[in-house]
Amino acid sequence: METVKTDVLIVGSGPAGASAGLALSTYGVPNIIVTRYSRLADTPRAHITNQRTMEALRDLGVEQEIIAKATPQHLMGNTVFCTSIAGEELGRLRSWGNDPLVQAEHELASPTRMCDMPQHLMEPVLTDAAVARGTELRFSTEYLAHTQDEHGVTVTVKDRLRGDEYQIRAKYLIGADGGRSKVAEHAGLPMGGQMGVAGSINIVFEADLTPYVAHRPSTLYWVLTTGATVGGIGAGLVRCVRPWNEWLIVWGYDVKGAPPDLTDEYALSVVRKLIGDDDLPVTIKSSSAWTVNEMYAESYSKGRVHCAGDATHRHPPSNGLGGNTSIQDSYNLAWKLKLVLDGTASPSLLDTYDAERAPVGKQIVQRANKSIGETGPVFESLDLLTPQDPAQLLANIEARKDATPVAEKRRQALREAIAYKVYEFNAHGVDLNQRYESAAIVPDGTPDPGFDRDPELYHQPTTRPGAKLPHAWITAGRRNLSTLDLGGKGRFTLITGIGGDCWLEAARSVGDELGLELATASIGPGQAYEDPYGDWARLRGIADSGALLLRPDNHVAFRYESAAPDAAELLGAALKRILGRD
Ligand code: FDA
């Protein structure tokens, strides 16, 4: 049997696999992606792309291409609740950073903006860049099985064009093969939660909805109509794919039975019901059934096999976290693989992938499922859960307009129920607040600052080791850049300021000693970088002469308050611990 060799074999070309290939190739690690079909994703699926993901993509050099192709943030922002797109509107929620107060928080938190980048547009950007930098992408190649030993993993794949099987020998295997991951199953990753919680159908269609939506631009329109609470994700959903003529409907079915027969006739009947305009020209593009899952891997790795993305966390699209978390998993894993493969770090560094990402996966699975439950009160506020008869449903909705105390209470309950959906549509803290604890983080002895405001809604920056480096706009001559732009690029970076020469010298000597590329940056008046707004001084959590050591993913790994006579020993000990060389 033919055997192909590589350093890292990636199974799957979705957001997790494609971004793993992109990051590894950017860092110069030979890798192959195998993917089952002869194409990339052919439906929009993941779309909300949050700031943490955009920061990773900025570091990997594809941010501008994503921005050029995505629907911009300002068109994402009015989550509408209605009886149908052409029917009565019940209320709106400013979403995805479009509430003016939240918008300011987004601008302060990151150099990049959230956007809506459907998965079928995202995957080609990631894989094109990955292939251009060295990834070998094998379409129509199905993973079948793997065995691992002390030195590597042998994977059996099937060439679906030729019909034969062959083996790929890799030093590491990444299972990015989605929600029905065979790699995770064969590796025996322990899973918590359950699959098949509810039944859902996606219908992709073309229709020019401009007259109904251009005045209230949004990524999501939620439809409260009869049958909308059966299965699915809490209500009927009309989601914009491309403004304003390509759309995706999510509609539920009772998971205890079989999914409906997905004929074009059935799909059209659902589209008509949710759009509410029987004369509108509609072209059905595709329909597919899927299930809402609530499952997460308690461990992401087994020996030389590491899983990422939906292979490890399976949940409904609520909060738009799936594709984001998948890309962020791979961004966390890739630099660790690079340093282990080039001998800079001990294999124990890879244990920190699981320690850092498994808690995030569990959190987002639970958050997404909680969000489904929180749609119920919108229906309850107008007594819409029980009526099966559309006329009765509309009568209940109409009753909220009465000049009676009961109707006034209903109006208030509806406003409150819609406002509470902020936990799904504006959860900035869920997007940004990951603070890691692992052997690749050196505690500095300070207590966890916790969160001053609701940690799900609000981002709270900190430089305490484990957190992502806070963003601040700084300058280099006439160039404006983010503090995040100082780090990344697959290398460690040390940031200091005036009086921190001992740290700069320590970085040089420790970098040489460990054979590690260690970039440095000094911020302050007359330094290579300046802080004209004083934002960095406010956020940095150290004195001018202190030091922050950033990992390649821009998480703070080590922090020291001020200059230190033994800076080289302190920095050396920290890096040895992070790299598993102590
Ligand atoms: P994904 O499933 O995308 O990719 C798996 C890959 O593995 C595919 O390339 C597949 O062909 C390949 N594969 C599988 N088995 C294989 C085998 N045996 N051999 C070789 N290849 C194999 N997320 C988000 O962040 N924001 C959002 O707004 C939404 N919205 C959304 C809406 C809807 C309707 C759905 C259904 C889902 C979302 N999601 C989302 C979730 C998102 O789609 C999902 O989390 C990501 O696609 C997961 O990316 P992965 O790369 O892990 O798996």
Image (cartoon, helix red, strand yellow):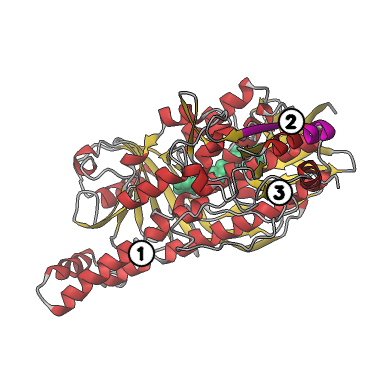
Residue 8 location (% of width, % of height): 75, 34
Mark 1 secondary-structure assignment: helix
Determine the residue positioned at 58% across, 47% down. Answer: 468
Of the two numbered discs 2 and 1 on the same chain, state the one appearing first in sequence: 1
The residue sitting at the top extreme is 132
Judging depth in this view, the residue of 26 and 208 nearest the camera is: 26
The answer to whether residue 171 is visible is no
Would you say residue 516 sits in the magenta stretch? yes
Residue 199 drawn above or below residue 63: below
Residue 495 drawn above or below residue 253: above
Mark 3 — residue?
A: 353
Q: Where does the magenta region start and end?
A: 509-521
Ligand 1 under 8 Å from disc 2 Cβ: no
Mark 1 — residue?
A: 420
The answer to whether residue 237 is visible is yes
- Quarter of the picture for ligand 1? top right
The residue sitting at the right extreme is 150
Would you say residue 7 sits in the magenta stretch? no
Determine the residue positioned at 47% across, 58% down. Answer: 199
Mark 2 — residue?
A: 517
